[in-house]
Amino acid sequence: MLITLCYLYLWARWGRRPAALVRATVQRLRASRCSFTFCGAAARPQGARVCLSRGGRVFCVGESQSIDDLNKWALFLVSPFILEAEHIAFVTESIWVQGDSLQRPASSSETIVKWSDCCLPLACRPGDPYQLIAEASVDDFSKLGVAFMEDRLQMADGLVPQKIVLHLQDCTLKALEDQASDKQAQTLQQNPEPSAESKPEPDAVECIGRDDPKVLGAQRTLGTGSASGSEPAGEGDRGAGSVEHCPLHLSSCHECLELENSTIESVKFASAENIPDLPYDHSGSSEDVADDIRLEREWRRVNVTGKAPNILFYVGSAPQKSLGRFQEVRSVLADCVDTDRYTLYHLSRESALRDPWSDNCLLLVVATQETIPEDLSQKFMAYLSQGGKVLGLCSSFTFAGFQVTSKSVLEETVQSLVFSKADQTQVKLSVLSSGYVYEESPGERRSLGKLQGHLENEDKDRLIVQVPFGTRGGEAVLCQVHLELPPSSSVVQTQEDFDLLKSSNIRRYEVLREILTTLGLNCDIRHVPALTPLYLLPATEEIWDPLMQWLGKHVDPEGVIKSSKLSLKFLSSYTSEIEISPSALPVVTDVEAFSSENFNLDIYRQNLQTKRLGKVILFAEVTPTTMNLLDGLMFEIPQEMGLIAIAVRQTQGKGRGVNAWLSPMGCAASTLLISIPLRSQLGQRIPFVQHLMSLAVVEAVRSIAGYQDINLRVKWPNDIYYSDLMKLGGVLVNSTLLGETFYILIGCGFNVSNSNPTICINDLITEHNKQHRAELEPLRTDGLIARTVTVLEKLIDTFQDKGPNGVLPLYYKYWVHSGQRVRLGGLEGPEVWIVGLDDSGFLQVQEEDGEVVTVHPDGNSFDMLRNLIIPRQQ
């Protein structure tokens, strides 16, 4: 009976005002080391004390925590970072729910509380769960929590809140502030939709005070509401759990027994405190907030819906064309931004007119030459007026006194563009023009942004403009150049145009990233992919048993071979529990378990025709660098078991000196082990090794029937080029003399199918097919690596037999320097003519007086763009 009476007291005291308990608890303890959590009962933090329980959800108090690595969070801030003095910061965790399974209120009469109306987002971390750091007042935080407890909290469409946690220590907020001060804020303004006003469906609220009774003892707080213990009984003050409708919740003896240990103490402390009445109106009305404060919040609000930042693409109304165009435009933006940070969606005309897409759109991309219908244009302008960002790509969409004017002489032609960046520096590049230019209407003079692009012609036609709009930070960058189209035979008509666009491809990406960054997107380098295990693979069946026997004698009892750079642990199989790090890599020896979409062992075997090189393969999908993988094996393994390390991607690829070598998907990356006797033709001329490897790559392609005219060439000292225009590969050689033998690791990477950001072999094949009406098939990395190793072994054998003269005719056939005139040392240096290679493999040039000078590759770099040979500074 006592339990029942106590429960009745608590229910009468708190049942009508669950927010009062939450608010009072947060207000009392927010400056302490407490963490407040709203969550499912099963997800209650270990050791947390429950203050309020309703159904399967609880409000509990635990010890404050720090957030994890803030580098993984994307800021949603305006600058400077300001956390208002009376506000608190908290984290919301949500999950994605699609379609009919989306969580809805139990009754249509329940008043929804919008997450976006109660707080200001600070940062997000996409994933499962999707996390948001936000700030709110104590009142709004309490309103969010109670709405969560009563299933009335609404986030963006598709997001369902699972937990609300106030657990940020000062150090976390300080780190957020520091991070905000170093980065350009991403802003997205919007007008929140007003919450519908309706009476709530009351339900029971159970108050449980199992722990320290001080948690329930609320102190007097400042704010609106009565200061006495009585509660207003007006009709308009009813909320969830009002006396007229709230039934007693004594559904089981078990629950009554749970109350026994806490109810009496809770009643004692609740009665002892003079608890003020803090009216709770869960309709979301903000009438008690001054207009200027509300307007300031509206101005500062960024991505307030709580949804992952969306990039939406409107590409026209024709269904049969829009999907292909969307994939085309999406592809280039996906190369510029981190797709783990942003979601990229197609926006149809119907959805643009019907759905509230502007609520969670960080950037709208308009990429269609169709005339934008008036009703759709109004939607886009409304989005801009709310602080939205628009990127127009060869689109008819324009505004603010600008008009798109046709200039047929420019249509689908390659032009020279001068682009001005935000820092006022300029980029010059070749672009494909749409045939339209931007002109200001007569009498219109607008204040434009710093991003501008005009042609290098007499009229200086304006093809890129940055146009601010409205007072909330809305702006658009409008382009009439095809930044979204990669150079290919489908968009250009001549070989000259293809070469011009490909030569400017890196700068095209530079311009596009500058535009996206200005519009608030983050174009930083993506996350490094996770390392994968190595696989030990034989190129021939007969080598496997000798290899296993050798391996059994050289691994330690744990199956490990160590070197100065890393350790390889040989295993029969791999499980996810096995750790992979740059210094400790597992090697799987079960060939039957191997499978890869990017490397076909059978194709490699078919193309490898060697006596010794490339017979034993260490393969990885992702590894730091292939140059280190053979370090512990190179001096021990028998020479007839020629080792090669192959990777689909490298996270720490190496170039000459301190240069890094990027290894995206589609690049053939490998390191080959060869051994050369010191007292041999090649052993006395080791610098030739890099020339032989470069030549082997070119010959591996051009020796295939039908591919002899693919314009691959070698460039001194160690590069593979397309004509004399663009680099698409390189060679790095590390040699160690041990006794009478050179042990040489030859690292090689060349672009096979990765068109961007420069050029690849398959681009050349596609262009060749167009120019010559041929049907050559694209090539594969696995087959080309094997062919390159095969050609290299033949070149080495020829060199050992005949010396330099045995290979130089073929080298000169493919090199790019014949008859070139360059200057030594700099722009003012003497002009010379390139002659060829000397007997040691170094470059020879002839001066005006006829004297021939040798230039050593280790001390020079050859700049093709300026025709300079620049000595290394001492």
Image: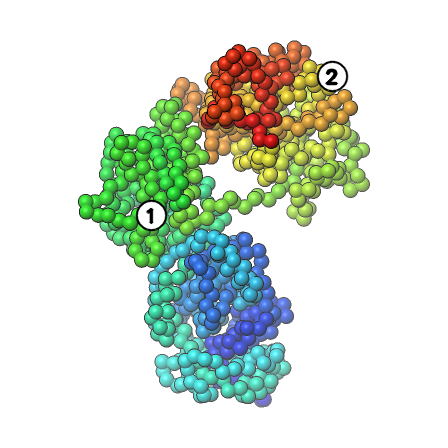
Q: Is residue 720 above or below residue 320?
A: above
Q: Quadrant of the N terminus?
A: bottom right
Residue density around tag 1, few if under 14, some if 14–19, many if 20 or more, within 10 Å = some
In-image side of 633 versus 161 (left or right): right
Residue density around tag 2, few if under 14, some if 14–19, many if 20 or more, within 10 Å = few
Alpha carbon distance from label 2 to label 1: 67 Å
User: For the residue marked with disc 2, what is the amino acid?
Assistant: Arg
Label 1 sits on residue:
449
Q: Is residue 302 above or below residue 108?
A: above
Instruction: Identify the residue at image location x=35%, y=46%.
Output: 450
- Of 830 and 419, the residue lying toward us: 830
Q: Is residue 645 above or below residue 291?
A: above
- Of 165 and 827, the residue lying toward us: 827
Q: Nearer the viewer, mark 2 or mark 1?
A: 1
The coloring applied to the image is: rainbow
Instruction: Identify the residue at image location x=24%, y=48%.
Output: 445
Instruction: Identify the residue at image location x=23%, y=50%.
Output: 374
User: For the residue marked with disc 1, what is the amino acid?
Assistant: Gly
Residue 114: horizontal and vertical position, in percent? 41, 66
Instruction: Identify the residue at image location x=62%, y=39%.
Output: 624
Precedes in sequence: disc 2 or disc 1: 1
Residue 327: horizontal and vertical position, in percent? 40, 40
Q: Quadrant of the C terminus?
A: top right
> Is label 1 in a helix, a strand or a loop?
loop
Q: Are marks 2 and 1 in contact (CB under 8 Å)?
A: no
Label 2 sits on residue:
679
Residue 630: horizontal and vertical position, in percent? 69, 32
Residue 625: horizontal and vertical position, in percent? 62, 36
